[in-house]
Amino acid sequence: MLPYRTEPKSSMFPPPTRWKQRAAVDPEREYVAFTSCFFLNSVRRVPAFVARSRHIMKQVDTAPGVVGWSLGGNLFKLEFYTLSAWLDAESLRRFVRDDNHLVALHEFERDLRRKSIFVYYKVLGRELPLSWKDALARQVRNDQQGRT
């Protein structure tokens, strides 16, 4: 298992979960990386969102094709982040369409104050674990490009 990258995460409270590596990594292989951000519109929905997230964490832990993952958020801003690496895009698509994740998409679609951010990119195994600093920067760039 590769060491956990420590880096400042001042934009997250509480700090993100540790990177959970779930598969062996080939340093020269290409993987699909994914990061997302969800913007809840009410503090009242946070307990339900966190409860559903716990179910999704159990799902991703055993998802076919997952390489590793971490979750983060900023409770003060009601923003919640994901970061994961997958063997391929199809593995990620299967996870999104399956079980608790699909239920959550429908359960919270009206509880979001704005459009969620989804960023897909490719990384080599030697770049794992993924960096939150890089993922958040990619989210900002993607969001700015989407608004122009």
Image: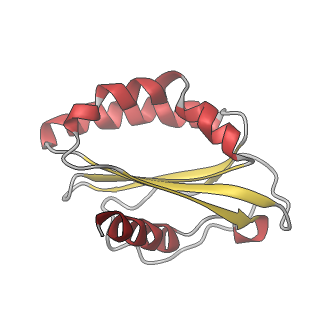
Q: Residue furthest bottom?
A: 8
Q: Nearer the viewer, residue 78 or 18?
A: 78
- In screen coordinates, is 5 left or right of 2? left
How many numbered marks have been drawn onto this rendered protein structure?
Answer: 0
Q: Is residue 43 left or right of residue 31?
A: left
Residue 142 x/y as whole percent: 42, 66
* Percent x, y of residue 102: 46, 26
Residue 106 vertical placement versus 10 (above, below): above
Which residue is at a point 32% across and 70% down the rendered structure image?
11
Image position, residue 18 (x, y; %): 54, 57
Position of 148 compared to 60: left or right? Answer: left
Q: Which of 82/18 is in front?
A: 82
Q: Residue at x 16, y 45 (%)?
A: 41
List the single residue furthest toward the front. 148
Q: Quadrant of residue 54?
A: top left
- Give the image location of residue 89, x and y in percent: 67, 45
- Residue at 66% in and 32% down: 62
**Quadrant housing residue 128:** bottom right
Q: How is the image coloured?
A: secondary structure
Q: Is residue 145 above or below residue 35?
A: below
Quarter of the figure with residue 106:
top left
In this rendering, would 143 be left or right of 71? left
Q: Give the position of the N terminus as an image quadrant.
A: bottom right
* Image quadrant occupied by the C terminus: bottom left
Residue at x 55% of width, y 32% of height: 58
Residue 22's place in the image compared with 143, above or below, is above
